[in-house]
Amino acid sequence: MQRQKSSIYPKVKTIYPRWLWHECRFCNKEFKRENGFKIIDYKKSRAVNEDPLFTSYCCNKCANSIEEVIEKIKKQDIRIILKNYKRSCE
Ligand SMILES: [Zn+2]
């Protein structure tokens, strides 16, 4: 029996916020009463050594599926890593 490794973080869920506004981590717009994504990130929080869960949100304008959200997060992470790397070289 085989399966995909389950420890792929971050975890992304689809949500439909009815009452609360959620801020998209990519475009910083708030959304409610439409589909969006909840991102539960363990990796990030372990690095900051704070709350064990780092929760952020993504609106449906920035991504259409869970896979797209994960792709966007990966790209964003790489950009942050590159930025830090450049800074350390200056
Ligand atoms: Zn967005």
Image (cartoon, rainbow, N blue to C red):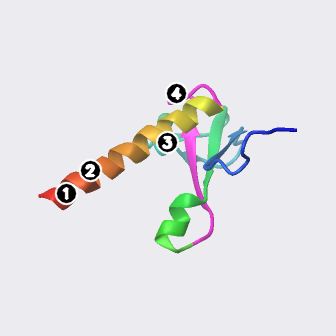
Q: Are marks 1 and 2 in contact (CB under 8 Å)?
A: yes
Q: What stretch is highlighted in magenta?
A: 51-65
Check disc 3 and report the residue beneath it.
73
Check disc 1 and report the residue beneath it.
87
Q: Does the residue labelled 3 lie within 8 Å of ligand 1?
A: no
Whole-angstrom CA distance, mark 1 to mark 2, is 6 Å
Question: How many numbered marks have been drawn onto this rendered protein structure?
Answer: 4
Check disc 2 and report the residue beneath it.
83
* Rendered position, 24 above or below 54: above
Q: Which amino acid does label 3 sit on?
A: Ile
Residue at 57%, 46% (x, y): give it. 57
Q: Which amino acid does label 1 sit on?
A: Arg
- Residue closer to the observer: 67 or 61: 67
Check disc 4 and report the residue beneath it.
61
Q: Which of the two labelled residues, at mark 1 and mark 4, occupies the earlier sequence position? A: 4
Q: Quadrant of residue 32?
A: top right
Whole-angstrom CA distance, mark 2 to mark 3, is 15 Å
